[in-house]
Amino acid sequence: MKILCVIDSLGSGGAQRQMVNLARGFKEKGHEVSFLTYHAADFYGKLLDQVAIPVKTITESNYLKRLLKMRNYIRSGKYDVVLSFLEGPSFICEMAAFPWRKWKLLVGERNADPSIFKSHKLRAYRWFHLTADYVVSNSHENIKMVKKINPLLSDDKCKVIYNMVDFERWKPSENFEYRNKDTFSLIVVANHQESKNAKGLVNAIHLLPVKYKDQIVVHWFGRRDSFELKLAYSEAESLVKKFKLEKIISFFDPSLSIHEIVPDYDALGLFSFHEGLSNSVCEGMASGKPIISTDVSDIKLIIENGFNGFVVDSCQPESIKNTLIKLLDCSNEDLKIMGKNAGITANKLFNKETIVSEYIDLMLK
C-alpha cells in the first residue's frame, strides 16, 4: 500500500512519536510510506531518515491557502491510505476528501480534552469525522467523548487502538537497583502545557513531610519552546524556587535518548488534568517502572493500585502528596514486583506487532 501520514509537525509531542513509530512499522511491513506536515519542527526527522521515509512540509501561514495546498498535495498523490493525527491535520484530510476520494481515510483522536465540549470549532471538527472511514483513538475514554459530540458516528467506524511501544528500545535496565544512593528517583516525561500540571506536582512535593522530601528527587523532561509552554514552565520553576525545592525538582529539555534515561529511574509519573493514552506511561511500563498517574484516559484500565503502580484519584496536590507517600513507603521488593508487573501489562497491551497489524487490518478492510 501507498500510505500518507499527515500531522502538524515532527516536533517532540506524543502524537508525533506514535505516528513516526507507526510509519516505521508500516515500512518494515513492506509498505510505501511518506509524511506530510505544515510546521517545520523536526525533532523526529532523523528517525524517518534512518528508514528512508520522505517528508513533505508545506509552510503557509494563511490557513485557507494552507488547506488548499495540502488538499492538492493529498489528492494528487495517488495514495491508497491517508492516516492523520490531531484535529487540524484530520480536518485538512477530511476537506481533501470532498467531493470524492479513492483512498481510505483514517483520522486519529489522541487527546481526551474536555474543553472540546465548550468550543464550537472543536465540536465541529468531530462532525467532519463522518467523511472518514474510521476514527481511531488511543483510549476508550476519548471515543466516548467523540461519540457524545457526534452521536451519528457508528460503533463500527470508531476504533480503539492503544499506543505502540518498541520493546527493542524500551526495556528494563540490566542489574537495576532501586533507591540507588538511598534516594527515590521519579521521572516525568511531558511537555510544559498547563494541562500537564507541573505546578500541582511542585505543590504536592512542597506538602510532603520533611522525612519524605529527604528521600525523593524528581526530574521532568519536556518541551518549553513556545510562548504557552514557556509561561507554564516559568510558573512551575518559580514555585520550585519559592518553596526552595531546587535540590528535589529539576527540569530538562526533551531527549531523543529518553528510552535510555527512563530505565535508570525508580518510577515514572504522570500528573495531567486530561490526556489521551500517555506515551510516557506506556513506555515507562515497558521499561519495568511502577507508575504513579492521575486518573485520566484509560489509566484505571491499565494501572491497578499496588499491582503495577498507583492511581491518583484527583489532580489536587493533597491527593498527589498522599499517593507519593504510598509509593515512597513501598519496599524495594515491592517496587521490583510492581515494575515487573508493569512490564507484563505493557507486553500484553502495547505490542508493536499487534498495534501495527491492527492499523493495517483497518486499511485493508
Image (cartoon, rainbow, N blue to C red):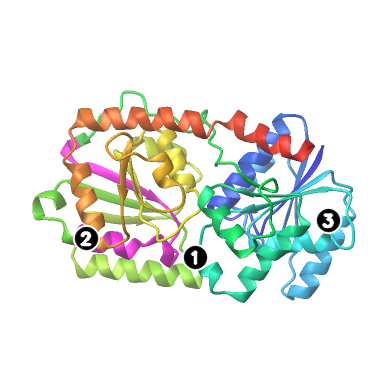
| Residue mark closest to the camera, 1 vs 3 | 1
Task: Evaluate whether residue 245 shows in this view.
Answer: no
Magenta highlight on residue 200 = yes
Q: Nearer the viewer, residue 335 or 122?
A: 122
| Residue mark closest to the camera, 1 vs 2 | 1
Q: Which residues, given as a range, are shown in magenta? A: 181-206
User: In this rendering, is residue 122 above or below 313?
Assistant: below
Locate residue 51, reporting x and y percent. 69, 36
Quadrant of res 289: top left
Locate residue 2, reporting x and y percent. 82, 41
- Residue sitting at x 43%, y 64%: 195
Q: Which residue carries the number 2 mark?
A: 318
Locate residue 238, reporting x and y percent. 29, 70
Q: Amino acid at mark 1?
A: Pro
- Residue sitting at x 16%, y 41%: 329
Q: CA distance from mark 1 to mark 3?
A: 31 Å
- Residue sitting at x 78%, y 68%: 67
Q: Which residue carries the number 3 mark?
A: 74
Instruction: Categorize mark 2 by other alpha carbons within 10 Å: few (<14), some (14-19), many (20+).
Output: some
Task: Evaluate whether residue 311 shows in this view.
Answer: yes
- Residue sitting at x 70%, y 48%: 157
Q: Nearer the viewer, residue 146 or 287?
A: 146
Q: Which residue carries the number 1 mark?
A: 114
Q: Amino acid at mark 2?
A: Glu
